[in-house]
Image (spheres, helix red, strand yellow):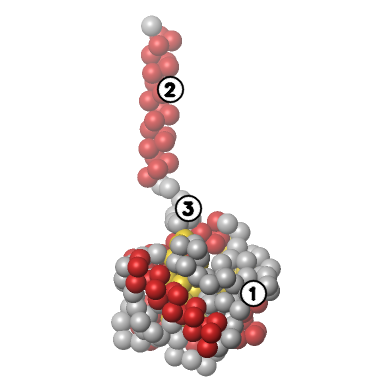
Amino acid sequence: MSRRCALLAWALLGLLRLGAAQETEDPACCSPIVPRNEWKALASECAQRLSLPLRYVVVSHTAGSSCNTPASCQQQARNVQHYHMKTLGWCDVGYNFLIGEDGLVYEGRGWNFTGAHSGHLWNPMSIGISFMGNYMDRVPTPQAIRAAQGLLACGVAQGALRSNYVLKGHRDVQRTLSPGNQLYNLIQNWPHYRSP
């Protein structure tokens, strides 16, 4: 009987540990990123790879229309890519990732390819994350903020970003109003933000 009690106690302890592990789950667990094929991205023509892990992240906004459903955000990602490739002649959408107000992250150039978001000095040493919309007069939705912060934690967990990465607003590295006044004010309170 004592052996049976010991096994039961061991099983119960195991279940308690499992429950505690789930309650303190690492926030760096990566949420799904909407892959390029899912938002029907055009094929990338980019070849310049990033040297990981990176030290910098640059946050911008697209300054265009916002989106708040997966369908509208997929369309908006296609619109941004079309403008970058067909009008500006770039090899792909300029950002490594786009954030929708639907709370999802959309893969742009991803973790491995150099973006075209912050000029020739910053592009090769940073990941560019752009919130889809204009954030001069309002902040993105809480879902969008969580998606961006989860992406950053994911980048550290996957070794794409250094654990001591530095976050910058687009206006910190180029002459621009991006990421918009309200989003810029918000990111200045994020733990990795450093002023110019």
| Mark 2 or 3: the one toward you | 3
Q: Quadrant of residue 19?
A: top left
Q: Quadrant of residue 190?
A: bottom left
Q: Which residue is mark 2?
A: 10
Residue 84: x %, y % from top left:
52, 83
Residue at position x 40%, y 76% in the image = 76
User: CA separation, marks 2 and 3?
Assistant: 28 Å
Callout 2 environment at 10 Å: few (<14), some (14 to 19), or many (20+)? few
Q: Which residue is mark 3?
A: 29
Residue 71: x %, y % from top left:
35, 68
181 over 113 or under it: above or below: below
132 over 144 or under it: above or below: below
On residue 46, the disc is: 1
User: CA separation, marks 3 and 1?
Assistant: 28 Å
Q: Camera-side residue: 147 or 3? A: 147
Residue 79: x %, y % from top left:
43, 79
| Mark 3 or 1: the one toward you | 1
Residue 149 can be seen in this image: no
Residue at position x 53%, y 84% in the image = 86
Direction from residue 119 to residue 180 in the image, left or right: left
| Kind of residue at disc 1 | Cys
Callout 3 environment at 10 Å: few (<14), some (14 to 19), or many (20+)? some
Q: Camera-side residue: 90 or 51? A: 90
In primary-sequence order, the first of circles 2 and 3 is 2
Callout 1 environment at 10 Å: few (<14), some (14 to 19), or many (20+)? some
